[in-house]
Amino acid sequence: MITFLSIALISTVSATTIADAGTARAAYSNCLVDFTTAQLDEKTGTSEFKKAATATCADERISMITAMKKDEMEFGSSESEAKSFATEEADGVLFAFTDSYAGFASSNTRPVKEE
């Protein structure tokens, strides 16, 4: 019975942490959607967009990295490993937007927010 309760408690904590990291990732992504859409509407050039995108949504990016770092450390990663992984994940979210910008501009399409 104690083992079952321990597993249930660990599962609950893990699910909450994953939800926090997932929520933070979605918030960062959605902020970038808003920024990208505004830049597309203003017809900002690709290189100018890429430069500006790295500095936008700083609070959301920090929140995502913090949540993912916490998650990774709870699963046994060292602080430096967790920070590196979380930063790489945030960089991947940003890259998805900077890499797709020219395609959005040429096709006159827009990114869609995560729900």
Image: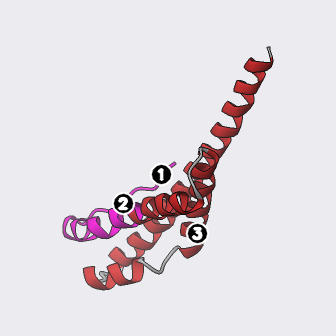
Where are the magenta residues, as a range? 92-115
Q: Nearer the viewer, residue 98 or 37?
A: 98
Prevalent SS, magenta region: helix
Category of crowding for the residue at label 1, using alpha-carbon neighbours closer than 10 angstroms: few (below 14), some (14–19), many (at least 20): few
The reply to whether discs 3 and 1 touch (Cβ–Cβ < 8 Å) is: no
Residue that appears at 34% across and 66% down: 95
Q: Is residue 2 left or right of residue 63?
A: right
Mark 3 residue element = helix
Question: Is 99 within the magenta?
Answer: yes
Measured as percent of width and height from the top left, residue 63 is found at 61, 64
Specify the quadrant that holds the N terminus: top right
Mark 1 residue element = loop
Identity, as a three-letter code, of the amino acid under mark 2: Pro
Q: Nearer the viewer, residue 81 or 14?
A: 81
Q: Rounded to the nearest whole Å, what is the CA distance between mark 2 and mark 1? A: 10 Å
In this picture, is 56 found above or below 93?
below
| Label drawn at residue 62 | 3
Residue position for label 2: 111
Measured as percent of width and height from the top left, residue 114 is found at 48, 51
Residue that appears at 40% across and 83% down: 52
Category of crowding for the residue at label 2, using alpha-carbon neighbours closer than 10 angstroms: few (below 14), some (14–19), many (at least 20): some
Q: Is residue 44 left or right of residue 5?
A: left
In this picture, is 1 found above or below 76?
above
Q: Rounded to the nearest whole Å, what is the CA distance between mark 2 and mark 3? A: 22 Å
Q: Earlier in the sequence, mark 3 or mark 1?
A: 3
Identity, as a three-letter code, of the amino acid under mark 3: Ile
Residue position for label 1: 114
Q: Nearer the viewer, mark 2 or mark 3?
A: 3
The reply to whether discs 2 and 1 touch (Cβ–Cβ < 8 Å) is: no
Question: Is 26 within the magenta?
Answer: no
